[in-house]
Image: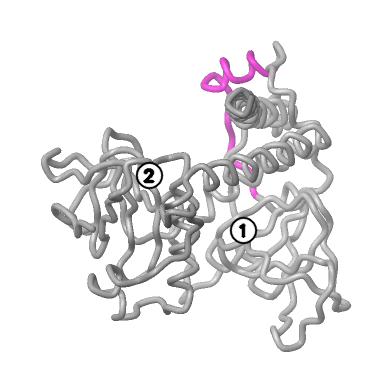
Amino acid sequence: MNTYKKRFDANKVEVHQLGTYPYVVRMGSNNGQKGFINEDPKFLNEGNTISFGQDTATMFYQEKPYFTGDKIKILKPKEKRFGKKNAQFFIAAMMKSFSSFSWGSSSYSVDVIKNQKVTLPVLSNEKIDFDFIESLLAEIESKRISQLETYLLNNGLNEYQLTDKEKKALENFDKCNWNIFNLENLFGKSTRGRRLKSADRVSGALPFITAGETDQGISAFIGNDVKVFSANTTTIDMFGSAKYRNFKYGGDDHIAVVHTNKLPKYASVFVTSAIHKSSYNGQFNYGRNFYAKDADALDISLPVKDGKPDYEIMETIISAIHKLVIKDVVLYVEKKKKELNKLTENANAVKC
């Protein structure tokens, strides 16, 4: 195990969204990558290693060279067969081994990490059974890809070709005319949710929305008799964060509901993004919460036609963006299916 070549304090470096070399920190998402930084390449850690958050036990396989932040240790494999095809199995075994540790524990010292034991499948000669690990991971991945493909087909999400109308809308986006509109004038008064303490919540099927970004603000699924808000509406939480809801839900008193349900779905999504841009700029916080009255006073910028909101162009733009995003997913599924089919063919050829 290597410790690191040089750590870079997140408060002392400029982190970019795009770049050549990833910057890995103790975050638990995005493979631990906060972004990219431009530092001396001599301080890069090797690829084909595992980054380990010393006081968080967050661990990720890093295929390419990368820089690290504070308290990231580098686990460098001794086994030559260790790599992208089997790394996730080792990480799963490590996570199970560290599952009893708590966040911030001082027990994540280098010595403890070195002495931690993991359970792995082995051959009769006690060597790691890489063939079994890789075949198991391939089987699991194949099932997940099949499930994803089925989901896309069942929900009509496999179509990603842009229509001429959608292409034109994207090409002419910069030429759109825009105007400012008051939210209450567009959709009437917003509605505030009602408080429902955690202890009073009864388990059920209705999503209950509270403030926060985790799970899109869905804190629980309840069976309580509460006001149910319509699908195709927008919620704004106490911090001003707006989210589109394509399902019926309940909401607590830190949630304001904007009644966009009469709009076409994609137009409502566009409006939600316009609301978020206007309301989520740091002006609302624990000291000053966003409430329904703030939604009523909110002004948003929308494309217009003949002086009125052009909901048709909004719908077309979001439809096009939706297809562009789905395209990556569909192509990913197709690519993975080809890779997995090739692995299966090779495995069958070896058996023969």
**Do the CB atoms of the residues marked 2 and 1 lie less than 8 Å apart?**
no
The reply, left or right, for residue 62 in relation to residue 243 is left
Q: Position of residue 330 (x, y in %)?
A: 66, 28
In this view, the residue farthest toward the right is: 225
Q: Which residue is mark 1?
A: 297
Q: Position of residue 5 (x, y in %)?
A: 14, 52
**Picture disc at residue 82:** 2
- Start-end of magenta stretch: 166-182
Q: Quadrant of the C terminus?
A: top right
In this rendering, which labeled residue sits more in front, label 2 or label 1? 2
C-alpha distance separating marks 2 and 1: 58 Å
In this orientation, which residue lies closer to the viewer: 34 or 107? 107
The image quarter containing residue 211 is bottom right
Q: Residues within 10 Å of mark 1 (few under 14, many from 20)?
A: few
User: Judging from the image, what secondary structure is the residue with disc 1 in?
Assistant: loop
Q: Residue at x 69, y 17 (%)?
A: 161
Which residue type does callout 1 highlight? Ala
Q: Is residue 16 magenta?
A: no
Q: Is residue 171 magenta?
A: yes
As drawn, 92 above or below 303: below
Q: Is residue 4 visible?
A: yes
In this orientation, which residue lies closer to the viewer: 133 or 181? 133
Q: Earlier in the sequence, mark 2 or mark 1?
A: 2
User: Judging from the image, what secondary structure is the residue with disc 2 in?
Assistant: loop
Q: Position of residue 163 (x, y in %)?
A: 72, 14
Q: Residue at x 38, y 53 (%)?
A: 32
Which residue type does callout 2 highlight? Phe
Q: Is residue 304 visible?
A: no
